[in-house]
Amino acid sequence: MAEREISQSRLYEWLTGDEDSRMCRDIPDEACDEQPHNFFLHLFASLGNKLADELSSARLVLPWLLGVIGAPLWMVGLLVPIRESGALLPQLFVAGFIRLKPERKWAWAVGGALQALAAAALALLALFGSGAIGGALVLVVLVALSLARGLSSIATKDVLGKTIAKGRRGTLLGWSGSVAGAATLVAGLVLILFEDRPGELALAVLLGVAALGWGLNALCAACIRETPGAVEGGENAWDSIKLGLRLLREDRNFLHFNLSRALLLASALALPYVALLGQQQSGTELGGLGILIVVSGVAGMVASPVWGKRSDASSRTVMRDTGLGAAACCLLGASFAWLPGAWTSTVWPYAMVYALLVIVHAGVRLGRKTYIVDMAGEERRALYVALSNTITGALMLLAGGLVGALAQWLGTTWLLVFLAAMALAAALSASKLPDVEQ
């Protein structure tokens, strides 16, 4: 047992680049000895979560699912707003409840288990769903999945802040993204082999693996050795709303961060439209889906560790740089659609842009996650995360409706130009944020 713990500590030190596994900034002293053990549980939990997210993606997999079962086209437009806002909006209302629990890992584990059940239900709908009724059931299950995701998200960040030291959180998130990217790559390669064969069984298998991923996430969360924390900060939903509004008025840095985060939604909103351009060239065959999943997996595998290290150094500059990168990707995707030539009439150029945008979006997610965890103190971390996520969820619904209307009016290519301008504004806003890693 002792030899296992020694080898675990050495592997932890190699992964983090730290020669002392007892570096314990911003976590309780009791958590120091458990940090290598908890690091790997966080790593595998994040692996399961990220793999499941990719294999049930509202940007790629679920639109294919609705197409396969013959659901109405308008339902596709609801997938991303439901997926994102459903996970974010309720978080302020559960933050006070979670704060009353000395060990928050159990809320995380329950959320993971509920997501596993929802993914299993989607797998069954891939096999037996049909038409408008099947599509409506997919949306209902997606609502449940997103609400469970919100419960896990707020608890995950609070447990991360209690068990992993400042200066190591971005590194952990980066490695987990890399490992999950490799697993997603394998899934995409398998899909390419299916080419234009019927997709019901393949989609059911993908969603079944997603259910196993969230099961792994829940199991690892339950096994984390968490030091019981303070419970004095717990509030009911209304008290949380009043406190959150007061924080937005009084903490100008927090308000500024949320403005930057809202503008950075451009990267998330652009991804399905870049994929849509590729789908219009390749059709709904599983080969095209496989290509997009492969490039997404490769991009995540390559990008996440780099962004993680950079986020530990300065998450503000990561947010700034990814805003610039998102703008460049949007403009590149629009330019391909306008250029003549047979090579722009295949899925490949849009797959390249999609891969670049996935790299950028990975940086957006890692940068903002690291920034909010490092900015908030231990006593207010759960509330800050929940309030920021609730604000972003509301804005996602509004932005999703606006973007959908603009897409209908302007078309996909000019919409990408609009999102490029939004991303440039995000870069400018993030560049003026204060550093919080010092």
Image (cartoon, grey):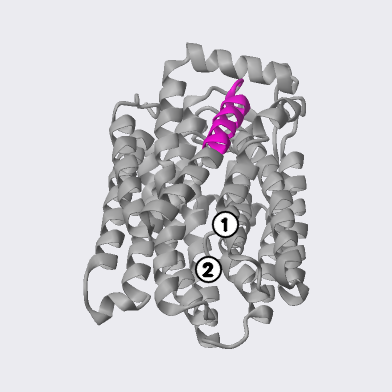
Q: Quadrant of residue 366?
A: top left
As shown in the figure, which amino acid type bears the numbered disc 1?
Answer: Lys
Q: Sequence-wise, which precedes: disc 1 or disc 2? A: 1
Where residue 254 sits: x, y (%)?
Answer: 46, 22
Q: Is residue 116 left or right of residue 266?
A: right
Picture quarter with the C terminus: top left
User: Mark 2 and mark 1 in contact (Cβ < 8 Å)?
Assistant: yes
Question: Which residue is tagged 1?
Answer: 50
Circle 2: element type = helix
Dot 1 alpha-carbon crowd within 10 angstroms: few under 14, some 14 to 19, many 20 or more: many
Label 1 – label 2 distance at C-alpha: 9 Å
Q: Nearer the viewer, residue 169 or 141?
A: 141
Q: Nearer the viewer, residue 417 or 250?
A: 417
Q: Residue at x 40, y 37 (%)?
A: 263
The span picked out in magenta is 379-395
Where residue 52 sits: x, y (%)?
Answer: 62, 61
Q: Nearer the viewer, residue 270 or 151?
A: 270
Q: Residue at x 62, y 45 (%)?
A: 38
Q: Is residue 430 magenta?
A: no
Q: Is residue 324 left or right of residue 2?
A: left
Name, please, the residue furthest toward the left.
340
- What's the mark number on residue 184? 2
Circle 1: element type = helix
